[in-house]
Amino acid sequence: MIISIIGTHGAGKTHLVRRILELLPEPIEQHKLYQAWDNIAVVGKYSGSACGGCDAFNWKGAADDIEKLVGELHAQGKHVILEGIIVSAWGMARYERMRDLGLVAIHLSTSRDDCIASVNDRRKARMGEKYTPVNPKNLDSKFNGLYKGVEKRRAVGIDVRVCDREQAFEVVKKELGL
């Protein structure tokens, strides 16, 4: 199974995965792109800043490299978790290829206002009084685009579950048998 956590900036994607990581023992493998246990792999970086996941991978071709890595980890018999804006914005062709590997897309239903507040809180923590608030129009565009993607993904047979943060945590725990 591949679990893709989808949501806009501030939706709680990285926070959700960090909560799952707290339930797991020390990984048996630490790689610069993922952590792995016997039957679970988490792709992305989760130390340091508030933002994490696959968004730390910003080289040209990163989306292709992530997809290839997910396929390799899946072929090893691992359940794979991944998240980030880079993953949320993947095109339909990539999601369709992943569908055939058992993709479950968890779309975080965090409200627009909560997303804006979360991003602003992160900016304040990082930049102090010199922070600039998020541009709501920019976030609105991404927010609305992701919601349109839910129906597109469902139309091609992808299991998309729209959940609030707590429901998403419970779904991921259940799917992984934690």
Image: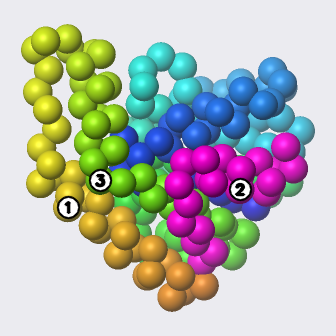
Give the residue at x 20% y 61%.
141
For the point 20% across and 58% down, the residue is 140
First-in-chain label (2 vs 3): 3
Characterize the local packing of mark 3: few (<14), some (14-19) or many (20 or more) Cα atoms within 10 angstroms.
Answer: some
Residue 46's disc is none
Q: Secondary structure under badge 1?
A: helix
Give the residue number, with chain letter if any, for mark 1: 141
The percent position of residue 34, horizontal first and vertical second, equals 64, 34
Q: Which residues are magenta?
A: 158-178
Q: Which mark is residue 171?
A: 2
Mark 1 residue crowding within 10 angstroms, few (<14) / some (14–19) / many (20+): few
Residue 160 lies in quadrant: bottom right
Residue 136 vs residue 90, the one in the foreground: 136
The residue wearing badge 3 is 112
On the picture, is 174 further left or further right than 64? right
- In the picture, measured across the screen, residue 130 lies left or right of residue 72, that is left
User: In this rendering, does residue 35 appear at all?
Assistant: no
Mark 3 or 1, closer to the camera:
3
Q: Quadrant of the N terminus?
A: bottom right
Q: Indicate which disc, 1 or 2, sits on the residue closer to the N terminus.
A: 1
| Residue at the outermost bottom position | 155
Q: Is residue 176 magenta?
A: yes
- The 10 Å Cα crowd at callout 2, few under 14, some 14 to 19, many 20 or more, is some
**Horizontal and vertical percent for residue 112?**
29, 53
